[in-house]
Each structure stands twice: as C-alpha cells, then as structure tokens.
Image (tube, helix red, strand yellow):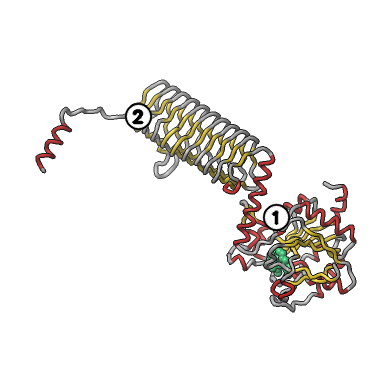
C-alpha cells in the first residue's frame, strides 16, 4: 500500500444501500442480488476494507436490518423512508459526531469498484483540500447517469438524466456516485438541499452546487475505466456486472497459472481457490467455498459446491456438493456426490453413480450405475455395476460397512445395516441381508434351471397360430 496513504485513519466510508431498487422489478432488495455467488453489497464492503478504511457505515432500509450479521464490523444505519441519496447520507451523521476528516460516500450498487481507485481518490481529495471530490468517468453511452456540468473547466453542478435538458444529456462525463467530502462542510450543507426535481427526492448530487455557491472548492477525480464504476439498476446491468466480475475473478486465477479453456463459459465464485496447472474446461461452475488443488482437470460440465478437491483429480460431467475428493481420485462422467461424500486417494467413481454421506477408501472403485449411501468402504474394493446400498428402511437410515479388498458382485443389493468382511466376495445379483464374514462368498440366488428345447418349441407354436 502506498506510503501516501497514511491519512486512511482520517477516512470514514458510508455505503448507501437503502434504495428499493424498483428498476430491478424484483421482491429481493437490489443490493442482495448476487454477483458471482455473493450479494453485491459484499463486494463494496470488501473493497472498502481492502482500501484500508476501518470506519464503515452502511445505510440500509428496515427490511435489511438483518444484513448487519453479514457486514462484520460495519455500523448499520437505518433509513426508514427512501427519500433520496442526500436523505440517506444524512442518517449517518449522528454516527459520525466524534469523527473529523474525509467522508467517502459509495453506492451499494457499484460492486466493481476497486480499492485502488478509492485510495487514489481519497489521497487526491486530501491533497487538493477540496470540500468535495466527485469520482467521474467519461462514458460512450451515459444512459441513466447524472451528468457533470462544468463551467470554465470546474464542476458547476450535477444534473440527473431525468432533469437534464437535451443539451445536458449530450454530456458524456458522468457522476459515478462515489465522492469524498470534508465531513464538517458536508453535514452543514446537506440540510439545505431541496427536493425540487422530477423524482421529488433529496439528491446528494445537489450538494456540489450548494458547496460551490458557498465558495467552496469542488474537485473531480476521473476513474480510469467505466466498467469499474458501473451502477447496477436493472437485471440487464446485473448480468453485465456478473460477466465483468466473472472475468475479473478468472483473470486472477489465470495470472496464478490456472488454465481456462473458455473463460466466457466458466463460473468461479469469489471465495473459490484453485491450484496452479489445473485446467478448467467449459461449462464449469465452481461455487461457494470450494478449493481445488494443483494439476487437476475439471470439466467439461462440472458443478462443485463447497467442496474440497485434492491434487491431480479428474472430474467431468459431475455435480459435487459439500464433499471431499482426495488426491488423484477421478469422478464421472455423469456422477453425483451429495453432502458428506469422501472419495479417498486414487479411488474412482464412474458413470451414473450417486454417493451420499459415504467414504470410498483408497484405490477403491465404484465404476458404474450404483447408489452408495451411509456407507464406509475400505481400501481396494471393487463395487460391481448396479450395486445398491439399501440404506433406508422407510423409517431410518442404516449403515453399510465394506472392509478392505472386498469384491462386490454386480447388481448386489446390500440391505443395511450390513457388514462385508475383509477380502470377501458377494455373488452377482445377490440380495445380502446378513453380514458376510471375511474371505467368504456371500451368495443369495435361486438355482438356475435350463429347460431343453423350450425356446424352439415356443417358436414353432407361434408359427402354427399364424
Ligand atoms: C445515482 C446518482 C447519479 C449517478 C448514479 C451512479 C443521485 C441523485 N444520483 O443515481 O448522479 O450517476 O447514482 O450510479 O444520487 N439510496 C439510499 N436511499 C435512498 C435512495 C438511494 O440508500 O433513499 C442508495 C441506493 O440503494 C443506491 C444508491 O443510493 O445504492 C444510489 O441510488 P440509486 O437510486 O441507484 O441512484 P441512481 O439513480 O443510480
Ligand atoms: Ca444506481
């Protein structure tokens, strides 16, 4: 962090997040809409923290009071009625009575903003000694943003799109909704703001004109790119923010040596970790607190949720939730690991296999068409195609234990609770209801009858009928 950033203790951040987000046309408050798996407010809060700002206030509406649990040390401020951004900021004033310095204002719907921009802007603001510094950006298409109206080069006022004249709408320099203020001057001028505008709201942007009229200095700091400061007001903008955030996360992992075959069709949540020389194939979703070790091959078409994947693991066409997959194991194609699966070193779970709350021991294989639930499988076990642990008796779930070196014949039904002893074998097609002792054969099958000539006779009978 820059040496110049010594002044950070003199910066308090206020995140405005009480708006209803009517343009989202959603029952969910806007700032709780997720981007790469996390509510957008979380990104703003993290960026503030990463900028080294310790004093943080978040203005929310009453519906969002429970958000406080997720906001760490931030002070939650309630704005009961949403009367505009100036009104929202005013609600923070009583909580800053003991504070002197710079108040940085951010919007909860600007999730891509970086800590570096915040820091650079605050340093600039403190250097120039301005009463207000506006973070601006020049956009190709300014859409609904407030326009920066300048007079002889310096900012005169900010005009909202809805209140702007046709001429003002042509201005491409816009307000990003991020500002630095001298605290005393800010809170003296906020009460002077009127709501004489198209939306009948108290606009924070009007503070600029008020301060200027009082002879105060207004500065501007230009953001280097427009993507970083985009506001999310509609579902369309949410999808755009999602795309940008996804790329940003993936680029971070690519810089650390992870290969993505197609970043555009891969999804990596903000809390995921990936080891180097791992390759991610398309249509892959890495979510929650998933961690992946080095030299893995993940995808195509894999969804990993809150799971731990070791080194050199291969997974294709699979869904893995709340599970652990150890080094050199392989999964898929087409398998589902439900909560509590533990696939140990070098073992294999193959096609059309479902595993739930079970351990598959080192070097064991469940290659085809099986259900394994509430089971503990030892080392070097082979589970034949079509095997089912019948774990549920309609009342409770029962355990199956398969010891090391067992060979489970194809289509074995293991009626739990049941134990197959070390080195034992079960005959294909058996319904195993009793424990099988070590090194024994468990066989449950009626004897086969062969009726000589039966099929031939049947064919002749059919011919006669025609
Ligand atoms: C605002 C700015 C606009 C700027 C744009 C940048 C104003 C008047 N306009 O417009 O100049 O270009 O941001 O993205 O400030 N909020 C509250 N309480 C309220 C109203 C809003 O907390 O009563 C919060 C919202 O949750 C949101 C932020 O303030 O996080 C901005 O409000 P929003 O309604 O999105 O303003 P814009 O129309 O985008
Ligand atoms: Ca907005």
Question: Residue 8's spot in the image, x, y percent?
Answer: 84, 53
Measured as percent of width and height from the top left, residue 287 is found at 59, 46
- In this picture, is 264 found above or below 353? below
Whether residue 18 appears in this view of the structure is no
Q: Is residue 11 above or below residue 190?
A: above
Relative to 374, is 420 above or below? above
| Quarter the C terminus occupies | top left
Q: In the image, what residue occupies the spot 57% across and 46% down?
A: 285
The answer to the question of whether label 1 and label 2 lie on touching residues, with beta carbons closer than 8 A, is no
Q: Return the residue found at the far top.
A: 439
Question: What is the quadrant of residue 460 in the picture?
Answer: top left
What residue sits right under mark 1 in the picture? 112
The image position of residue 300, as x and y in percent, is 53, 42
**In the rendered image, which residue does mark 2 sit on?**
428
The first of marks 1 and 2 along the sequence is: 1
What residue sits 89% from the left and 57% below the top?
Answer: 127
Asked whether the viewer can see residue 144, the reply is yes
Of residues 152 and 17, the one nearer the viewer is: 152
Q: Which mark is residue 265?
A: none
Give the residue displayed 63% in from the left and 57% down from the top.
240
Rendering coords of residue 318 (x, y %): 50, 41
In this rendered view, identify the residue nearer to me: 58 or 395.
Answer: 58
Q: Residue at x 54, y 32 (%)?
A: 329
Q: Secondary structure at mark 1?
A: loop
Q: CA distance from mark 1 to mark 2?
A: 58 Å
Mark 2 crowdedness (10 Å alpha carbons): few <14, some 14-19, many ≥20:
many
The picture quadrant for ligand 2 comes to bottom right
| Crowd rating for badge 1 (residues with CA inside 10 Å; few <14, some 14–19, many 20+) | many
Report how many numbered discs are placed on residues in the image. 2
Name the image quarter holding residue 392. top left
The vertical placement of 198 against 57, above or below, is: below
The residue lying toward the viewer, choosing from 234 and 442, is: 234
């Amino acid at each position: 962090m820059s040496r110049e950033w010594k002044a950070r203790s003199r910066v308090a951040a206020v995140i405005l997040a009480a708006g209803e987000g009517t343009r989202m046309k959603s029952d969910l408050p806007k700032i709780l809409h997720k981007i790469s798996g996390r509510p957008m407010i979380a990104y703003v809060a993290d960026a503030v923290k990463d900028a080294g700002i310790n004093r943080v206030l978040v203005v929310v509406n009453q519906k969002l009071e429970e958000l406080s649990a997720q906001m760490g040390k931030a002070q939650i401020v309630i704005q009961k009625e949403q009367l505009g951004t100036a009104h929202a900021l005013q609600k923070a004033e009583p909580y800053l009575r003991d504070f002197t310095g710079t108040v940085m204002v951010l919007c909860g719907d600007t999730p891509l903003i970086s800590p570096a921009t915040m820091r650079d802007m605050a340093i600039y603001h403190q250097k120039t000694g301005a009463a207000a510094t506006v973070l601006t950006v020049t956009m190709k298409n300014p859409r609904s943003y407030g326009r920066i109206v300048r007079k002889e080069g310096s900012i005169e006022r900010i005009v909202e799109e809805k209140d702007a004249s046709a001429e003002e709408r042509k201005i491409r320099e816009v307000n990003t909704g991020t500002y630095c203020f001298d605290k005393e001057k800010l809170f003296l001028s906020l009460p002077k703001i009127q709501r004489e505008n198209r939306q009948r709201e108290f606009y924070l942007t009007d503070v600029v004109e008020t301060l200027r009229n009082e002879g105060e200095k207004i500065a501007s700091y230009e953001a280097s790119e427009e993507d970083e400061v985009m506001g999310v007001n509609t579902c369309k903008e949410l999808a755009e923010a999602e795309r940008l955030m996804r790329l940003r996360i993936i680029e971070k992992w690519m810089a650390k040596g992870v290969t993505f075959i197609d970043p555009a069709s891969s999804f990596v949540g903000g809390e995921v970790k990936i080891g180097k020389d791992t390759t991610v194939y398309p249509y892959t979703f890495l979510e929650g607190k998933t961690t992946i070790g080095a030299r893995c091959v993940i995808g195509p078409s894999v969804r990993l949720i809150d799971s731990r994947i070791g080194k050199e693991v291969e997974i294709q066409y699979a869904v893995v939730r709340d599970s652990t997959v150890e080094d050199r194991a392989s999964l898929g194609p087409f398998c589902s690991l439900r909560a509590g699966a533990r696939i140990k070193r070098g073992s294999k779970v193959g096609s059309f296999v479902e595993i739930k709350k079970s351990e598959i021991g080192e070097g064991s294989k469940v290659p085809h068409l099986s259900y394994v639930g509430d089971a503990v499988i030892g080392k070097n076990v082979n589970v034949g195609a079509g095997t089912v642990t019948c774990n549920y008796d309609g009342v409770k779930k029962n355990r199956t234990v398969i010891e090391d070196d067992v060979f489970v014949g194809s289509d074995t039904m293991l009626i739990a609770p049941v134990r197959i002893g070390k080195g034992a074998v079960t005959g294909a097609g058996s319904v195993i209801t009793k424990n099988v002792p070590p090194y024994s054969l468990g066989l449950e099958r009626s004897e086969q009858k062969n009726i000589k000539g039966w099929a031939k006779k049947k064919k002749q009978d059919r011919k006669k009928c025609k």
